[in-house]
Amino acid sequence: RLSSTKELLLNAERGGYAVGAFNVYNMEGAEAVVAAAEEENSPAILQIHPSALKQGGIPLVACCVSAAEQANVPITVHFDHGTSKQELVEALDLGFDSLMVDGSHLSLKDNITYTKYISLLAHSKYMLVEAELGRLSGTEDDLTVEDYEARLTDVNQAEEFIDETGIDALAVCIGNVHGKYPASGPNLRLVLLKDLHALSSKKGVFLVLHGASGLSEELIKRGVTKFNVNTEVRKAYMNSLSNPKQDLVHVMASAKEAMKAVVAEKMRLFGSSGKA
Ligand code: G3H
Ligand code: 13P
Ligand code: ZN
Ligand code: NA
């Protein structure tokens, strides 16, 4: 059934688990996440990145909403990483239940102005608003230690950011990255996460972690209620396409199976299996 992101995250917070938000790009992706959720009896968030929306358009959102409506577990549809006013304003009317305002490329002051503007509009439509403070690195970024540290979320700034913008969920940067982690594993600042969790609890906002491909379950116990997963699902999709001689329908079915297996594994890791 089509649910609300707020309800899913509130249940996760009370139940001590996290909900996976999986980036989907087409019908097979949406169906793979829903099929995994049904098999695991888990809630799930289908999220669409602007690049996916540009490609799939309104039919992609409609496909996700329809897949959610037909599911026998709670599913929501979320707009991921809105980096411009225009794309976020457009996203307000497409059927999403929640959205992410990504002003992490801006100064604190401009990020506040931008996030607050969208937050007011989205709240008038009863949508949940997630926003990011700090700046998430990509594995490809070759940063100096100083640059890297400068991108972590600052607790004092986070308090001001939450107060000024009225957001519902805060995406934090504690050393998590989009894409793959180095072979040595993620270098996460758990003390910083603890402080950010204390702040988010005090302020009544949910804690979100992006770049969850490659992250472990210990973070759930530290207050994270939404994990974003993209890379591992995409990789499963791409790897499944390696035998081009197969019939198209079989290629699509095996892509769906490959994605479903990754998503189900994440649901067990996040503790959301059995919680629908
Ligand atoms: O809308 C936000 C929720 O009320 C979050 O509550 O303080 O328990 O994280 P929390
Ligand atoms: P990964 O690609 O590391 O899974 O990150 C996903 C993400 O944060 C999407 O917003
Ligand atoms: Zn992200
Ligand atoms: Na990652």
Image (cartoon, rainbow, N blue to C red):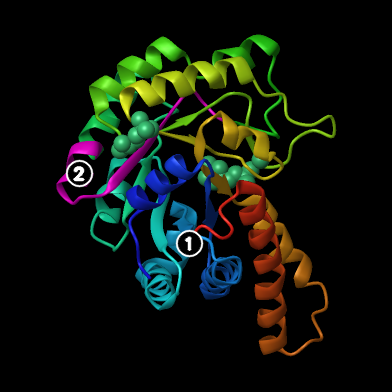
In what element is the residue under mark 2?
Answer: helix
User: Which disc is residue 123 wearing?
Assistant: 2
Query: What residue is shown at x 39% (from left), y 60% (from top)?
Result: 76
Badge 2 amino acid = His
The residue singled out by tag 1 in the image is: 276
Examine the rendering and report whether any part of residue 194 can be seen.
Answer: yes
Q: Are marks 1 and 2 in contact (CB under 8 Å)?
A: no
Residue 4 shown left or right of residue 144 in the figure = left
Mark 1 vs mark 2: give the one in front. Answer: 1
Q: Quadrant of residue 73?
A: bottom left
The stretch drawn in magenta includes residue 17: no
Badge 1 amino acid = Ala
Query: What residue is shown at x 65% (from left), y 62% (from top)?
Result: 264
Residue 97 coordinates in the image, percent (x, y): 31, 56
Q: Quadrant of residue 116?
A: top left
Q: Residues within 10 Å of mark 2 (few under 14, many from 20)?
A: some
Residue 229 shown left or right of residue 81 in the figure = right
Residue 91 shown left or right of residue 132 in the figure = left
Examine the rendering and report whether any part of residue 168 can be seen.
Answer: no
Q: Where are the magenta residues, as a range?
A: 119-136
Quadrant of the picture in which ligand 1 is shown: top left
